[in-house]
Every structure is written in structure tokens, then in C-alpha cells.
Image (cartoon, coloured by chain):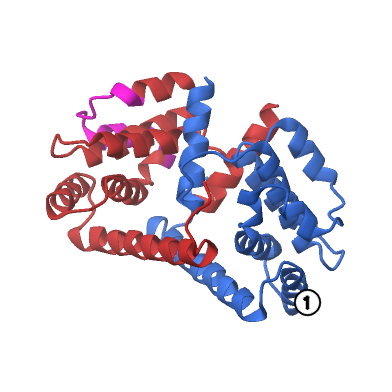
Chain colours: A red, B blue
């Protein structure tokens, strides 16, 4: 039933971004591509990083055609143009930097070259170095809190 | 494509609980029902609270039959039996308390009567009052961090 699927997607978008409706496919496509472009700023997008972005796209309801596109997307377009495709994606520039930092952390570490790349791409989006640091701080706090949650919930480790 | 759907579900279960595979429908059903039983310990499950649980169930891939069941589930079964349906749900007792606290917060406030209810239900699961407090602390920290994230990402408010 599409209704149940939409209820699930709305739940996810609300938890993540406090949306009260599901974004258009156009906005969602521009947003997801922009994460990949940002994480690929140095031309070195690791498979784990792409997988993390594609996994999120799948979770948030990307149609099969978009999933397929993201799996082989070169991620070398002009980020400023891609994110500006709709007003709601356009105002989500900080959020895409947040997701790009998470993607870059998906292979274990968010290192200095990755930080430099994200900062460079953020500058193209009009986001200052100081703002990138604040966004990064949120990502670090979230990762720490997730770790704390997991250790409290499953002291013996996850059952699956 | 089922593959894409599963990739999305795996992404969600990994982010939330560090699972490396998707739980069985049996485990998932027992877990979701247990959240409702816990939140309904006082017989006063608000519609917003049930909606939050059903929304999460939809997001995490509940089949339509389970969604329908949860929508009208009386949530008055023996929680200890329902959660023990599989080994992996059985070891997820703290996590269900975590989700129950989040469900109880879904109508705006996690108040003292709700706290008493969750603590009483947790005791049935062999979870101490001190542990419930620690779990609650995680929920509070997560809610604060989400708020901080939203304010940083969308200083003018969410676009949708």
C-alpha cells in the first residue's frame, strides 16, 4: 500500500529534518546528487562512501531509476547548479554538507584531506569554513551519542 | 526492486542499532508490539504515540498486514512473552524501552505519569529504575542534539 510507504517516508523525513511533507523527486534527486558531488570534490569517492549515500537514498524512498543513476553517477557536475534545482533543495545546502561529512566518515575516518575537500565544496555553496566546522561538530556529537546508545542498548554487541 | 528496498532497510537498521542484517518478521513484530505494550502500560496510548510507532514500523519495512495489525493492536499482552519471541528481540529489551520513551514523547511531553508507566513496564522486563534513567538520558540528549541540528541546518525553519 502506497499509504504505508508514504507514512514511513514521512516519519523518516520528520525525524531527520522536521519536514511535514515528502520532498518532490526533483528536489530529492538534486539533493542526493549534491551529496555525492560534495564528497567527491577530490575525485576520490570511496565505494563505502557512495554506498552510504545510495543506502540513504534507498531508505528515503528513491525510485529504482534514481538508485541506478546514483550508483554510477560521476558526481562531477556544478554543485551550485545541481542543488539549486528547487527552492527546497536550494535552502538545504548546510544539510547536504552534513550528509557529505557523514558519507566521508562511512569508510571509518573523516580525515584531513576529506575535510579540505568538503570545506572547498562548501565554499562553492557560500558556506564559510567556520560553518563547516559547526556542522562537523554536530556530526561528531551524533556519532558519539550513537556509540553511547549502542553500548548501553547492547552491551554484548548487536544481536544481528 | 526488492534489492534496493533491502539496501535501504539495512541502512536504517545499521544507523539505528548497528545491525548487519535485517531482522526476521517474527522478531520485528514482537519488538514493535512490545513498544506499544510498554507505552500503553497505563492504558492511555495517545493517537500521536501510536502513530509514531506505526510510522517507525512503516519506515523500517513492516509489511501491510503488520501495519494494519499495529494500527488497532490492543497492546495489553504480556510484554515479557511478546519480546521473548526470538533471541534477537529478547536481547533488545533496553532498546524497546528507548523506543517507548520516544513514543511517549511524540505528543510533545514525556511527563511523570508516562515515566512511571515506562518504569513499571521496564521492571517486568527485568530492567532497573536506574537503567531506565540512563536510557531516558540518551533520549533527552538525542532530542537536544536533533534540535541543535535543525536550528543550524535550517535557521529559518524547515522548507517543507
Residue lying at 61% horizontally and 36% vertically, measured from the top left = B61
Q: Tell me if A35 is positioned left or right of B93 in this view.
A: left
Q: Is residue A141 visible?
A: yes
Q: Position of residue A115 (x, y in %)?
A: 17, 53
Residues in magenta? A70-88
Residue A42, quarter of the rendered image: top left
Say above or below: B92 vs A4. Answer: below
Q: Position of residue B87 (x, y in %)?
A: 64, 50
Q: Chain of mark 1?
A: B
Q: Estimate the x, y position of residue A129 in percent, counting from the top left.
A: 18, 59
**Residue at 76% across, 77% down:** B116
Quarter the N terminus of chain A occupies: top right
Q: Residues within 10 Å of mark 1 (few under 14, many from 20)?
A: few
Residue B119 location (% of width, % of height): 72, 74
Q: Is residue B9 magenta?
A: no
Residue under pointer 1 = B113
Amino acid at each position: 500500500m502506497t499509504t504505508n510507504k508514504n507514512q514511513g517516508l514521512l516519519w523518516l523525513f520528520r525525524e531527520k529534518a522536521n519536514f511535514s511533507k515528502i520532498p518532490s523527486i526533483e528536489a530529492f534527486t538534486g539533493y542526493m546528487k549534491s551529496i555525492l558531488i560534495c564528497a567527491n570534490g577530490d575525485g576520490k569517492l570511496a565505494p563505502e562512501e557512495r554506498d552510504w549515500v545510495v543506502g540513504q537514498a534507498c531508505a528515503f524512498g528513491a525510485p529504482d531509476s534514481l538508485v541506478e543513476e546514483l550508483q554510477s553517477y560521476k558526481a562531477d557536475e556544478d554543485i551550485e547548479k545541481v542543488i539549486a534545482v528547487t527552492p527546497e533543495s536550494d535552502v538545504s545546502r548546510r544539510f547536504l554538507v552534513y550528509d557529505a561529512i557523514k558519507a566521508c566518515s562511512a569508510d571509518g575516518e573523516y580525515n584531513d584531506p576529506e575535510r579540505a575537500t568538503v570545506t572547498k565544496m562548501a565554499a562553492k555553496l557560500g558556506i564559510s569554513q567556520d560553518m563547516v566546522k559547526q556542522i562537523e561538530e554536530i556530526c561528531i556529537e551524533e556519532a558519539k551519542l550513537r556509540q553511547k546508545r549502542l553500548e548501553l542498548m547492547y552491551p554484548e554487541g548487536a544481536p544481528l
